[in-house]
Image (cartoon, helix red, strand yellow):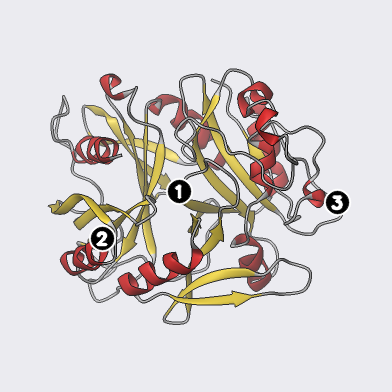
Amino acid sequence: MRFILAAWFISAVGFGCAGPQVVLPDVSNAPKSIRHAGKFVWFDLFTRDLPGACRFYGKLFGWSFLDTAPGNSNVKTISNNGIPMGNAIQLKSEMDKAVTSKWIGFMSVADVDRAVERITKNGGTIHIPPKEVPNRGRLAVALDPEGAPFAVLTASKGDPPDKPCVPNGWVGSELWTRNVKEALKFYGNLVGYEAETRKMGAAPACLLLMRDGQVRGGVAKIEWKDVKPNWVPYIGVTDIEAVVIKAEKLGGKVLIGLDPDREDDVAVLARVSSRGVSPLSSGARPQTSQTAGPDAAKTPQADAEIGSGKIVDCLLIYSLTKDKRSMIITFFGTWRSLEAHLNGVQGVRSSNLRVPTTKYLIKRAS
């Protein structure tokens, strides 16, 4: 994992890369006085298939991918309606066997060096020590005690202001963890998150990460084997069914259809390449727990269901068209249905699972 994160950082900032050195874009143009501790303010995708990622996400969400530095096509700036929202980085071919595609979220902190001290004091690991990156700010890349990667950042300018989510824009990120209690303690000590459990109507109770009265993230307990702890980013869309249909036209496949008995419009979206490896499990597929019964280990792996391709990078999407508060509840729910469908379990409807929210798992044909 250290090699993977180091490779990501080196590729992103241009050290050791052929071509012009990359100067990354500002996170926002807000004044330095605007800081939102604990907010995920930026996401970078590092991938072995940059052209494929640009085509898939560009056509699906309407994102633009432009060279961050003229003459260097290995780092792209991702924009949504002209507003930068992330970078996509092509990793070198010699890194292929060691590096999986992954989204890395940047968590805002007031002081990166102090954050690093807290991370190490509380059981985390620093893999990229604090560095000043032109235009981006001071940052460090870490693993939490369970190995979930994330970055901490004090942006050169201010953080993006808290506004309603724009279509096809970031909404937040959810931590998948095996030890909720310890995760809450770790991130609470790091950025002052306070845990809040909410339940509304028939929606499953969810655990939110709050800071200064704002929802900054969510937490879901991993209850299946081999799926590694991870921060998973979310995209808000206005028409989730249209996004799913478009994904199919782009070569995707819906593994979980719409459940008419549920009002939740939530989807798990993954891009797949024949050369890729699951970012959730680094090659091993999640095993079902109670859903598929004691013979789950004998169930064909997900690759049997989705052909020769493997999931390479993962996003979650949800509908922006419903009541804001109820959608936050749904948005930050747990995702246990993923365990069955990543194992290729046939005939399992989302309503039969322990958390019966509607979800889609979409693959991109390579």
| The disc label shown at residue 296, or none | none
Residue 282 lies, with reference to residue 231, above or below; the image says above
Q: Nearer the viewer, residue 116 or 271?
A: 116
| The disc label shown at residue 153, or none | 2
Q: Nearer the viewer, residue 250 or 12?
A: 12
N-term-proximal mark, 3 vs 2: 2
Q: Quadrant of residue 40?
A: bottom left
Q: Quadrant of residue 17?
A: top left
Q: Is disc 3 in contact with disc 1, using a CB cutoff of under 8 Å?
A: no
Query: Residue 338: x and y, percent?
Result: 64, 44
Q: Residue at x 64, y 68 (%)?
A: 329
Answer left or right for 202 relative to 207: right
* Residue pointed to by mark 3: 260
| The disc label shown at residue 80, or none | 1
Q: Nearer the viewer, residue 221 or 108?
A: 221
The answer to whether residue 26 of the structure is visible from this angle is no
Disc 1 residue type? Answer: Asn
Label 3: few (<14), some or many (≥20) within 10 Å? Answer: few
Query: Residue 196: x and y, percent?
Result: 54, 77
Answer left or right for 257 relative to 287: right
Q: Disc 3 versus disc 2: distance between alpha carbons? A: 42 Å
Element carrying mark 1: strand
Disc 3 residue type? Answer: Pro
Label 2: few (<14), some or many (≥20) within 10 Å? Answer: many
Of circles 1 and 2, which is in front? 2
Q: Residue at x 19, y 53 (%)?
A: 135
Element carrying mark 3: loop
